[in-house]
Image (cartoon, rainbow, N blue to C red):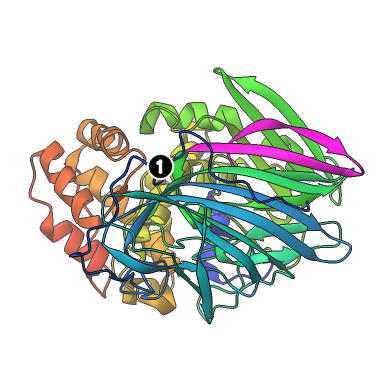
Amino acid sequence: MTWWEPRRGVALLLAGALGLTGCTTTDEPAGAGATGSSAAEPSPSPSREFKPGAAGAGDGYYPKYGNGGYDVGKYLLKVRYDPAKDQLSGTATVRATATADLSSFNLDLAGLTVRKVTVDGAPATHARQGNELVITPASGLASGNGFVAEITYGGKPKPLESTTAGSGGFFHTSDGAIALGQPESASTWFPVNDHPSDKAAYDFEITVPEGLVAVSNGVPRGKSTSAGWTTWKWSEESPMASYLSTVVIGKFRVRTGEHKGRPVFSAVTTRLAKGAADRSIDQTVRVADYLETVFGPYPFDAYGGVVVSDDRINFALETQSRPVYSGGFFDRGENTEVVAHELAHQWFGDSVALSRWQDIWLNEGLASYGAWLWAEHSGRSTAQQAFDIRYERVPPEVWRVPPGKPGVQDLFSASVYERGAMTVHALRLAVGDAAFFKLLKTWTAAKKDENASTEEFVALAERVSGKQLDKLFDAWLYGKKRPDRPKTA
């Protein structure tokens, strides 16, 4: 994520100056080949003790985010949205595997009304506990077995308010809607295991009034129009954290193409005059090609970007394969630095996702450093210059907040971005360029499509470099004062 505000504080203004700138649906039973229970599977043994799944993934920062007891393999989301009435209706098919013997399990769903639930084709009971949807199947779900839950739901979606990260979720706009936000947003428009630790594949079918565009993640699978409504289909086969899912509905200038055998799909809102935003997003594949040289192969099956214009969206977010940008990033002209930041996230944060929210610096520090590298490649400023200016000029609070353990209140603070990137540069200076760039490519290859932690990153850095790095990471990630200026290896 990258923030944009006209009157943002010194730290992120520094970053900008230096280049960080940052359907009416029908129920559809699971088809043949779906991950789920089948007649061939044995019935649960009477001796098993079935218990409710946990109503949270156990994250230290957000204990109630996500749920326990199962692992989702894929979501099929069929959603119809009428902007004129601000009404959404949908059917979510959730294909998962039980990781415990479950008498019931939870999904996260905020505000919307559930009309029907089945599990493996049989009716299931359901209840709401705040933003938790508690599903009790007709019989227990045995650990290790697949199952398919289908939820039919609808209502008027609303964003969620956070005291630490602002609003996130489904926003009704003048010409459609935007579903976007971090650390949570998905549960405002579909039932989901809403924590990055449970990544899954997604298929989307988004039906909107004819004449509107509905953009989502992954590979475009075509569109069809009937009786004044158009259904847009998208498929993200690579595992994706739930907060990286998006749908953007409205009037857009659409650009399509192909690059390296992958589709390119970009959209810029017609609320912005054609110009800097279009030119910047058109540079997506050029930026991605450069980042491949330092991070390894681009990790997804599609490229693109979406530019929106809404006063509530004052940030860019690394929604998988197709980042969403506030139009404000392009007020002063072409801006490929923010494109570089969000594209760097495709490796760091999307392909390699967080295991826990405390480790957000792994996303933001490495993505910010990717923007520094792009600025250097583009001849604007070197990574060393970017480091030096921040080392001397960032506000004192950057040194008081440890990016490796920022706390919930400072999860998206300047320390996580600025000091996170400075940590990456200090590591580069300590181990030398050969080991550093080998580390980045080894990390993205070894952890592709998985979740990761700071401890794993540190261990790999020490193994690749052959150096003991405890003092460096203790000072830069966990210390509460400015570390000594790093020395070159």
The residue at 58%/37% (across/down) is 235
Q: Circle 1: is it few (<14), some (14-19), or many (20+) Cα within 10 Å?
A: many
Nearest the eye: 39 or 368? 39
Amino acid bearing label 1: Ser
**361 magenta-colored:** no
Q: Is residue 18 found left or right of 351 in the rendered image?
A: right
Q: Is residue 302 found left or right of 223 in the rendered image?
A: left
Q: Is residue 331 visible?
A: no
Q: Is residue 92 visible?
A: yes
Q: Quadrant of the C terminus?
A: top left
Q: Position of residue 429 (x, y in %)?
A: 24, 44
Nearest the eye: 386 or 201? 201
Q: Which residues are magenta?
A: 217-237
Q: Is residue 185 found left or right of 428 in the rendered image?
A: right
Q: Quadrant of residue 140?
A: bottom left
In this figure, which residue is indicated by the disc labeled 1?
Answer: 351
The residue at 25%/34% (across/down) is 442
Q: Position of residue 409 (x, y in %)?
A: 43, 79
Q: Please, what is the dominant secondary structure of the magenta stretch?
A: strand
| Residue 188 in the image: above or below residue 145 | below
Secondary structure of residue under mark 1? loop
Nearest the eye: 41 or 259? 41
Q: Position of residue 66 (x, y in %)?
A: 41, 66
The residue at 41%/45% (across/down) is 36
The residue at 53%/38% (across/down) is 31
